[in-house]
Structure formats: C-alpha cells, structure tokens
Image (tube, rainbow, N blue to C red):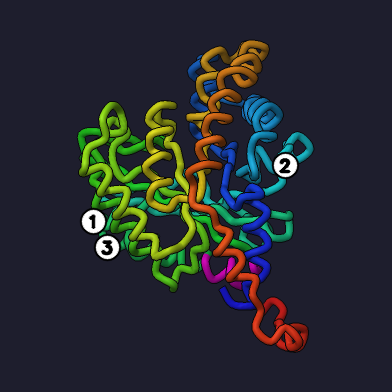
Amino acid sequence: MNTQNLGKLIHLKKLCTENNHFQMLAVDQRPPIFNIISQATGKKHTYSQVVECKKLITSHMSEFATAILMDPHYSLSNLLSFNKSKGLVITLEEHSFTETKKGRYSKNIPNWSVEKIKRAGGDAVKVLAWYRPDAESKSIEHQKNYVREIGQECEKYSIPFLLELLVYPFQDDENHTTEYQEQKQKKTQHVIDSVKEFAKDEYKVDIFKLESPVDSSQLEGEISQDTKAAFKDLSLATNNKPWVVLSSGMGKDSFYKCLELAYKNGASGYLAGRTIWLDAFNQYPNIKQVEEGLKKDSRSYVNKLNELTASNAQSLETYFNNGFKIESPEQFTKEFGGFE
C-alpha cells in the first residue's frame, strides 16, 4: 500500500488481535435469521424479532471477537451499545439479488454507500458477490463492474474493502437454492478461478472472505491429498492479499478442519457467524435457553477457534510493518492528499 492508503492500514489493524490475526464475528445475516424466526414461530419475521436475535448474539459473543460485522438496517441502527469488540465491519450489499437461469446480479442496500459506511465509523466495507466463472456473460460483467466500482469508492475514502465471494447453483441445477448456504457439489476450480479474478489489482480488494474450496463433507474424517491441494491453490489465487475464512453455516468439526487447512496455507483468521451461534437458536423463541446455549456451547467453540487462530494463523505483522513505512517522512504533510 502507498501512503495514500495509510487510513486503510489503520482500519485493518483495528480488526486484528495484538498478534495481527482476525477473529471476526458476523451478525449481518438476514435471510438465515428470518428463517430461524419463521421456522420456530410459523409466522413471518418482524423487525423487532430480527433485532432481538442479533442483540442476543452481539451481547453474548462480541467480547470474544476482534471485530463484528453488522448490517445497517437491523444491526448498526440498534446494537452498537451492545458491541464489545473493537472493530466494526459494515455490510453494503442487499441480501436479495436478481437471478436468471445462468446468473446472479448483486446490488447495494438502498440508500447505502461506501461513503456512508465511512461516515458511520466503519473500519471496513464488506460486500458479498455471487460469482461463477461459467455464468452468463451479462452476469459476469455486471458482477465485475459492481465489485470494481466499490473498490474505487473504498480507495477514494481510504476504507478497507473486504470482499466475500460465493459460488452458487444455477436454476436448473439439481441442488438449486437461493438460501445463503454452501453450494452442494460445488466445483473447486470455480472457487479458485473466482478468487483469481478478483485478486487482480483493478478491483482494489484489501482482504478476502473466502469459502472452503471443497464441499464441507470432504472436511470430515481423513483429509485427502486433493483437498490439501485445493487449499494450497486457493491461497495462491489470492495474489498475496490477506484472507479470512467464512463458515457458510457448516458443522463445527468441519469448520475447525477448514481453518486448520486454511491456516497451513496462509489464512490470517476467520469471519464467521452461524457455525458459532446457530445451534443456540434451536431453542428459539425460548430466549433464556438461547442465552444458555450462547454462554456455554457457542463460547466454548469460539474459544477453541481463537486458540487455533492464535497458534496457527498467518500473522500480518510483516504486512503492517511494511505498510507503515513511510519514505521521506519529513515530506509527509506536504505530499499526503485528501479525499478526491
């Protein structure tokens, strides 16, 4: 990073532990939490119920995180006083998307922008982009342009761009779903090639949030050589940009295995949600029992993840040390520009 991106580095540092690892908690989920409520009550979710679920997670789990990922509609507008982590990542993309037979089209939350995230005190802009390299050309170009424009805005306002990439099933696929979950029988090369594309400098991504390159079922039991090779290829595809692992709601044991493999290949932490806290909501709408689950099982699990991260994840110490080196410091105030 050059001197003009000093602000990005300072924000990224806030998302890390003292040892420069990421241990980030996601509460920005929308459809997954809508589903918790509707399945438990048999009714459509209400605004207050969604906020209540997110408040429970934030109140009981954020103290174990270096940063929290919030959406602006339900989380940011209600939960800041309950957040006990030091870093704040804010979501930009709308949870609903346009879908055609061979493609998906992302868009921003209405009336929301990179500028507003910066103004609200965010330390990073998070965007989920659905992407498949074999999608229809119009979808591919739309998604590329969508990500590129956000990267340019993040550069303008000196705020880190955290890009989450997910492959997805086409409408005529056997396992088609619009739910926010891991694509069944996904192709490893689709995941790798997607990361390769957006690791190009033109997109100005500062940190990746990446899914497992293999189906989570392949993370159970003995790990194959193909799976090990897939994680190595995933790391190479990042073009040396920092990356963290997302959980896609996979099982606790599978996600732990996923982190082990990712850390061996250079990942610097995780940004996870459902795998950490979803089991506690099996008791919803019994709030007392949900709280008990968060206090016991969820906390125990996240402590296990944090221990693994502290001992095995790739530290970004060198990355920050190099980034904070300023040539000709005596010229800093003269040469350092403002927002353009």
Along the horizontal axis of the image, is 18 left or right of 106?
right
What's the distance in space between the residues labelled 3 and 1, CA to CA? 8 Å
Quarter that holds the N terminus: bottom right
Point out the tag, 3 or 2, that comes first from the N-terminus.
Answer: 2
Along the horizontal axis of the image, is 288 left or right of 153?
right
Residue 316 drawn above or below residue 67: below
The region drawn magenta spans 151-158
Quarter that holds the C terminus: bottom right
Point out the tag, 2 or 1, that comes first from the N-terminus.
Answer: 2
| Count of marks placed on residues | 3
What's the distance in space between the residues labelled 2 and 1, CA to CA? 38 Å
Residue 211 drawn above or below residue 197: above
The residue that disc 1 covers is: 134
The residue that disc 3 covers is: 137
**Could you say whether the residue bearing mark 2 is in a helix, strand or loop?**
loop
Q: Position of residue 69 (x, y in %)?
A: 60, 44
Q: Which mark is residue 77?
A: 2
- Within-10-Å neighbours for mark 1: few <14, some 14–19, many 20+: few
Q: In the image, what residue type sits under mark 3? A: Ser
